[in-house]
Amino acid sequence: MFNSFLAGAPVLLKAGSPGFIVGPIAKLMGIVYNWLFNFIYSFTQTGTLVLAIILFTLLVKLILFPLSYKQIKGSYRMQMLQPQLNKIRAKYAGKTDEDSQRRMAFEIQEFQRENGASMFAGCLPMLIQLPILYALYYIFNQPYEYVGVINDVYTNITQGLLNIDAATRVEVLKPIILAKNMTVDVSVFDQVMGLVRTMSAADWNGVLTSLGQSAGELSAILAQKHSIEYFFGLNLVSFAGLRFPGVLVPICAGLTTYLSTWYMQRKQKVIMGGQEDQMAAGMTKSMNIVMPIMMGVITINVPIALGIYWTLSNLFSVIQTWGTYKVLENKESLFSKTRRKRKKTNPNRLRAR
């Protein structure tokens, strides 16, 4: 039959499955993202995908705020406790034997525990972010699986192609199928849908050019797809790559990662003491350089939408850090004023903090 070519069993190009661990997370997050998408879509069709990303990022930051607040508060406590920690270190200055080092480490850990401070308070928020990032990769790479409106658009595009007479359909789609090294029966809905999911803007431009005036209905549906998926010339569901303007997303992801870590370090102002702390500070400084570069490289090979999510998440983190430190500093200032006032009124009633 002329509308089935490239002999052999049909092969559809499918994106990877999220698996049994990330899959349920992706499904749950997909439900939330779909709800946000539909809410925005009820007001505007233009840029719906990126507007939903902004709202989704804000929602994730709000949900994780209690953990982030605990992290920043722990870092702030570490900063305030540095003078006492330095006194403990001074007790063991010059003592390099194993027993002395073990006792110093124990005293420091006990002091931190009693005062609600921890050097590892920032680990949990980052660990929680990892499965979220994995899940979002699949949501943005396969939006038609998670967002009902996008699935409807892809379905309508597929039906629009099937409405074209068979001979023209084969002529238009054959070069694309051959270029992608796929086997597709262009008379079967599911197989044409699989092809549609892989087609780029350049592919669609070729299709519309070939169809000419007869592309009316299909052209309107493709315009709807474009208005949803594109933002300032960026196809949010495609990979960033190294070409302009897509490469701007990995650059922004790397720069904002550096900004977020740099700002957090700047706010902490922890005075490190001892050789071990100097080594830790050196490692932290190295990570502050390596992490932004690593995130920039990773973002090259993921959907642009995920890079935008990470960039926005970093910017929200800076705002969150600034606001939290303001609250903590105001509380500390209020406590200090109250303490001085009580000391002047009745020194004997002053309690140790």
Image (spheres, grey):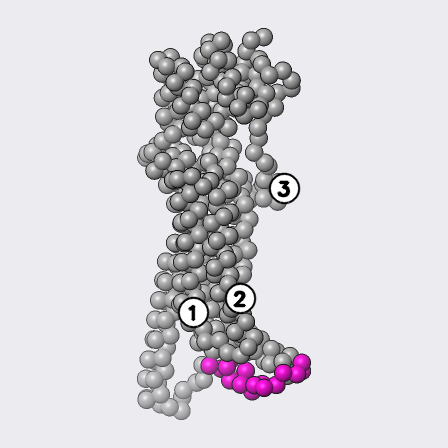
Q: Which SS class for mark 2? A: helix
Say few, some or many: other residues with alpha carbon within 10 Å of mark 2 (under 14 / 14 to 19 / 20 or more).
Answer: few
The quarter of the image holding the C terminus is bottom left
- Tell me where residue 70 appears, x and y as whole percent: 47, 64
Q: Secondary structure at mark 1?
A: helix
Q: Position of residue 83 (x, y in %)?
A: 46, 81
Q: Where residue 153 is drawn, which disc sits there?
A: none
Give, as a three-letter code, the residue at label 2: Met
Image quarter of residue 269: bottom left
Residue drawn at (51%, 61%) of the image: 287
Q: Is residue 147 above or below residue 339?
A: above
Query: What residue appears at the point 43 percent right and 19 percent down from the top-left corner?
Result: 207
Report the residue marked by disc 1.
268
Please say whether residue 233 is one of the residues in the magenta stretch: no
Q: Is residue 7 visible?
A: yes
Q: Name the N-terminal-most of marks 1 and 2.
A: 1
Q: Residues within 10 Å of mark 3 (few under 14, many from 20)?
A: few
Tell me the chief SS of the magenta region: helix
> Is 85 contained in the magenta span?
yes
Q: Do the residues bearing badges 1 and 3 touch, measured as CB atoms within 8 Å?
A: no
Q: Mark 3 falls on what kind of element?
A: helix
Q: Identify the residue shown where x is 62% and y is 40%.
A: 19
Observer-side mark, 1 or 2, equals 2
Residue ID for mark 2: 283
Confirm whether residue 35 shows in the render: no
The residue stretch that appears in magenta:
83-99
Q: Is residue 41 left or right of residue 172?
A: left
Q: Amino acid at mark 1?
A: Gln
- Residue on which disc 3 sits: 20
Q: Is residue 68 above or below residue 18?
A: below
Q: Residue at x 64, y 79 (%)?
A: 102
| Horizontal side, residue 174 vs residue 308: left or right | right
